Image (tube, rainbow, N blue to C red):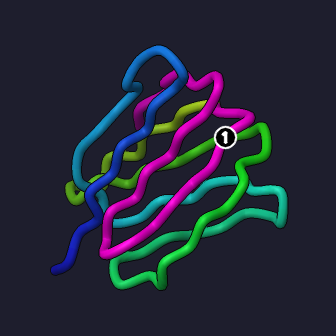
Amino acid sequence: MAELTVSVVSADHEVWSGTAKQIIARTTEGEIGILPGHEPILAILAKGEVRVTTPDGTVLSANADDGFLSVEHDIVTVVARNAELVATA
C-alpha cells in the first residue's frame, strides 16, 4: 500500500515527521483530505486541526495556524507559524 511522507513544522521546530496513510487539514477553502496519489497542491492553512493517520491506524492531532500545506509525489509538508502536537489516539 502506498504511503505519504509527512513533515509538520512550525516556525522554530519540527512538530512531527513520518509516514501516513491520510492527512486531514483545515484550509482557507475548507477541510481537505490527502491520500497517497493526491494531485500536487499548495493550500493556505486556516487556524485549526491537522490530523495525521499513520499506517498502523494511530491518529495524531496538531493545532496549526498561519501557514501552508503542499503535496507533491506523496510528500506532504505542513508549515505553520505556530503548530503543536495536542493528541494521539
Residue shown at 41% from the left, 18% from the top: 13
Which corner quadrant holds the N terminus?
A: bottom left
| Residue drawn at point x = 78 percent, y = 46 percent | 46
Residue located at (41% from left, 37% from top): 89
Q: Nearer the viewer, residue 15 or 49?
A: 15
Instruction: Name the residue: 58% across, 25% down.
Output: 83
Quarter of the image for residue 71 reads bottom left
Element on which disc 1 rests: strand
Q: List the residue tagged with mark 1.
A: 67
- Give the percent coordinates (x, y) of residue 4: 29, 64
Q: Is residue 9 above or below residue 69?
A: above
Residue 61, image x, y percentages: 51, 37
Side of 76 relative to 3 (left or right): right
Magenta part, dominant SS: strand
Reply yes or no: does residue 83 show up in magenta: yes
Q: Over which residues does the magenta segment extend?
A: 64-89
Q: Which one is nearer the viewer's eye here, 57 or 70?
A: 70
- Residue 37 x %, y %: 35, 84
